[in-house]
Amino acid sequence: MKLLVVGSGGREHALSWSLAKSRRVSKVYIAPGNGGTHNQEKLEAVSLSDPHELAKFAAEQNIAYTVVGPEAPLAAGIVDIFRQNGLKIFGPTKAAAQLESSKDFAKEFMVRHGIPTANHKTFNNPDEAKKYVSKQGAPIVVKADGLAAGKGVIVAETVEQAHAAINDMLGEGKFGSAGARVVIEEFLDGEEVSFIVMCDGKNILPMASSQDHKRLLDQDKGPNTGGMGAYSPAPLVSEHMHKRIMQEVIQPTINGMHTDGIPFSGFLYAGLMVQPGDDKTRPIKVLEYNCRMGDPEAQPIVMRIKNDMAVVFESAVNGNLSPNAIEWDPRTALGVVIAAYGYPDNVRTGDAITKLASNSDNCVTFHAGTTIKDGVLQTSGGRVLCVTALADTVQEAQAIAYKAVSQTEFDGMQYRKDIAWRALTN
Ligand code: AMP
Ligand code: GLY
């Protein structure tokens, strides 16, 4: 069968890399793909991104099903368009994708269904928002309601910082319509975990646990980014914690969407804050939902899948996903993101990538912000590559990944040297 993957990031490269390994798959088209999505047998990039054109392509090419990577096409209704045309696609509808595309929708949903999350209030009037912040005190969190490419959350350490964020969003319109409403939220202390599941509307298949590194610099310093590296499994998610997350967060979310008449299919990503305490009692609270896999969490997670993902997705689009359909490699996978000069604020593109490590069974360089121009592989985005290694221990995975990083070269490359540090200190 022929498949289509929509997106151009490291997550989509990893998904199509995995799907192309299936013996049942003759071709994986990736739209639009990146500078690394043509190097594998059976992978082919197609330069399309409009959902209607993609649906036309899928129909003409007799694509068995489509997998959508990023949130933007999901929030724009690509799943609705494909389904209206009788095409199979894995992802949430536009209505269900509101779990990610509107923070206010997500918060109201959680309150309605008793899903644990930080206390909040939503505002569209800057003076009222500021008054509320002054009353609550700092630290406090200010979030743009809509999609803001990972930049719409300000964890304010002072009331003044929170006021400035409110001015940016509600006063100056710095985030456009995404910031026309703000959610103000109680600050939560604890350790973050990404918990991702696949869902076909009713059946749930949990992915292996993972942890992202959101800050730019070592020791979790510097500005927030889309993610500078990730690893799987996350030791924090013990068997007991896994059960609790399923019972307290995931199952009520899927049930709640069903009750509200907008069943969720696709990847559901719960960004969780696990607060201090012991495994039985420590509070687990939802920071955010995403309606897709995480990037870079997907890269290590996908490296740990031992069986045929094409079959797993096929059962999901047909509504008979089995909760145990994935066989996980017990080893640790770890991905180090290599970002461009100036990331995350002023990304420089167009740097030639002069060296890349060779891929092997236990180390793969997934591409993200890369393109080929005049025959030269060069940077084209903030997060350029994700070097992902698989090994028996966290230390070995680090050693393999960082060796491959040292064999990679482009001007201005920056990366963290401490990916998975929490796994070594827990
Ligand atoms: P979000 O996009 O909502 O996950 O927010 C981005 C990042 O901001 C999260 O990964 C956390 O590091 C931080 N964050 C969000 N909400 C809170 C909160 N209520 N308390 C503390 N940190 C938060
Ligand atoms: N790595 C976090 C995200 O994909 O949202």
Image (tube, rainbow, N blue to C red):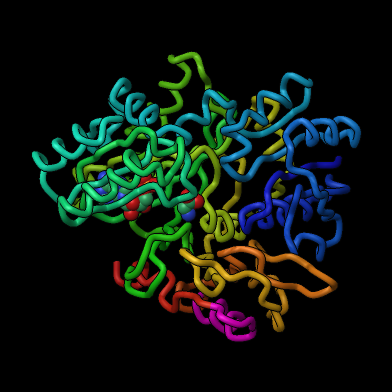
Q: Quadrant of the C terminus?
A: bottom left
Percent of width and height locating residue 422: 34, 67
Q: Is residue 48 left or right of residue 12?
A: right
Q: Is residue 124 visible?
A: yes
Q: Which residues are magenta?
A: 398-413
Which residue is rendered at x = 19% and y = 51% of the image? 278
Q: Is residue 279 visible?
A: no
User: Is residue 83 found inside the magenta-colored segment of the image?
Assistant: no
Percent of width and height locating residue 144: 37, 40
Percent of width and height locating residue 289: 42, 38
Q: Is residue 158 left or right of residue 184?
A: left
Judging depth in this view, the residue of 283 and 39 nearest the camera is: 39
Judging depth in this view, the residue of 353 and 264 nearest the camera is: 353
Which residue is rendered at x = 32% and y = 73% of the image? 219
Percent of width and height locating residue 358: 72, 78
Above or below residue 86? Residue 391 is below
**Farthest residue, direction left:** 135
Answer with the quarter of the image where residue 402 lies.
Answer: bottom right
Count of marks overlaid on the render: 0
Q: Quadrant of the N terminus?
A: top right
Which residue is rendered at x = 42% and y = 58% of the image? 211
**Farthest residue, direction front:** 172
Q: Is residue 425 left or right of residue 101?
A: left
Which residue is rendered at x = 73% and y = 26% of the image? 82
Judging depth in this view, the residue of 85 and 319 nearest the camera is: 85
Above or below residue 255? Residue 63 is below
Above or below residue 15? Residue 344 is below
